[in-house]
Amino acid sequence: HATDYVLEHKVTLFAPGAQTGKRVAIVGAGPAGLACARDLRRKGHAVTVFEAQSQPGGLNTYGIAEYKLKSDVALAEVQDILDLGVELKLGITVSSIDDLLARYDAVFIGVGLGSTKRLGIPGDDLPGVTDALTFIAHLKTHPYRDTAVGRQVVVIGAGNTAIDAVTQAKRLGAATTTIVYRRGEADMPCYHYEYELAKRDGCGFRFNAAPQRVVGNGSGTVAALEVTTAQGNEMIPCDMVIVAIGQGDRTELQWPKDDPRVFVGGDCANGGAEIVNAAAEGVAAAKKIHERLTNG
Ligand SMILES: Cc1cc2nc3c(=O)[nH]c(=O)nc-3n(C[C@H](O)[C@H](O)[C@H](O)COP(=O)(O)OP(=O)(O)OC[C@H]3O[C@@H](n4cnc5c(N)ncnc54)[C@H](O)[C@@H]3O)c2cc1C
């Protein structure tokens, strides 16, 4: 790919602009925040990015399945942006933007979505039940052998994240991996090619099966998932359940909707889309911020 060539040959794509003396704070070092940071530096504004995690990149570093994007590639792309002179403060969870508004000329919020929604059925807190984002983040930040995977894995949900989780579980060595989805095949929200990929990996699919409870084995871990089907209730044996039913909103940080110094983009603004959308929204926000900082 073109970007691989750029990274391998250390091609310099962008240069910082002449200093304007204006300062912008960015909350969140995901694709939205980083794209915004890059374009603001190109215009010569001083940019500080605040990131809660210990590594930048957002879901590019912590969420996208390994076979699509490895963390080291995501981090190399971040480095190109930092090389423009963007200041990055890691391990800082911004809980209020009031202080930032007092110290910066504008603030961009790109905090993404929150954690995976809970199943809300009995047994969903048993050891052996995990959520897809935690499972994938662990896999992406540890050697493969350090990520625990069951022998019989059930993944609940049928979006692209569910496909990532089920294929990753299979590739980690699970004997059986099964997507359980309460609706039919035609209703699956995942892309068709992702579905085909999971089938090629040997993953199974149970459609029109609504999860009712996670059943323990008596010693506290998972033994089965009880589902309701058109034929009645059924137990699907499993020793690991991965929940992939979508991310909730990020509610920890609130921001004023009518302050002209505050800009928002990426998943937290569009409800969850793709990397390209987040980056495009970061770029669009940088343009608006630049206009505001130069024209008042
Ligand atoms: C499992 C999974 C797989 C995906 N696969 C694909 C794919 O294959 N292709 C694709 O195009 N898209 C994919 N997506 C979607 C894509 O990852 C997102 O659309 C994109 O990452 C959104 O970028 P963002 O910058 O808005 O948010 P994020 O990437 O979520 O980044 C937000 C950042 O803000 C930080 N943050 C949050 N709150 C605070 C705070 N209070 N203070 C400081 N920092 C904070 C977070 O730690 C995070 O680093 C996938 C998503 C998931 C969940």
Image (cartoon, rainbow, N blue to C red):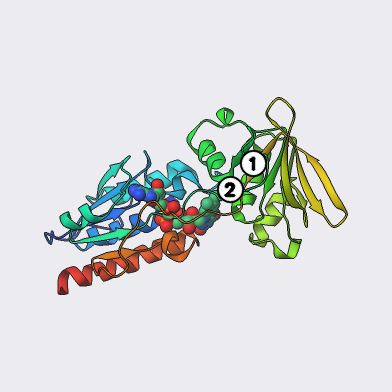
Label 1: which secondary element: loop
Q: Amino acid at mark 2?
A: Arg
Residue extending furthest toward the right: 231
Which residue: 38% across, 63% down? 265
Q: Quadrant of residue 15?
A: bottom left
Which numbered dot is residue 124? 1
In percent of width and height, residue 244 lies at 61, 49
Disc 2: CA contacts within 10 A as few (<14), some (14-19) or many (>=20): some
Which residue: 66% across, 45% down? 166
Q: Ligand 1 within 8 A of label 1's CB?
A: no
In screen coordinates, is 229 left or right of 164? right
Instruction: Give the vertical position of 135 relative to 103 (above or below).
Output: above
Residue matched to label 2 = 118
In percent of width and height, residue 160 lies at 61, 55
Q: Amino acid at mark 1?
A: Asp
Q: Ligand 1 within 8 A of label 2's CB?
A: no
* Badge 1 vs badge 2, beta-carbon distance below 8 Å: yes
Q: In front: 216, or 78?
A: 216
Q: How many marks?
A: 2
In screen coordinates, is 289 left or right of 7? left
In screen coordinates, is 188 left or right of 38? right
Disc 1: CA contacts within 10 A as few (<14), some (14-19) or many (>=20): many
Q: Quadrant of the C terminus?
A: bottom left
Which residue: 73% across, 56% down? 182
Q: In front: 54, or 100?
A: 100
N-term mark: 1 or 2:
2
**Is residue 2 among what the camera can see?**
no
In percent of width and height, residue 278 lies at 42, 61
Q: In front: 105, or 200?
A: 105
In percent of width and height, residue 211 lies at 73, 49
Residue extending furthest toward the front: 122
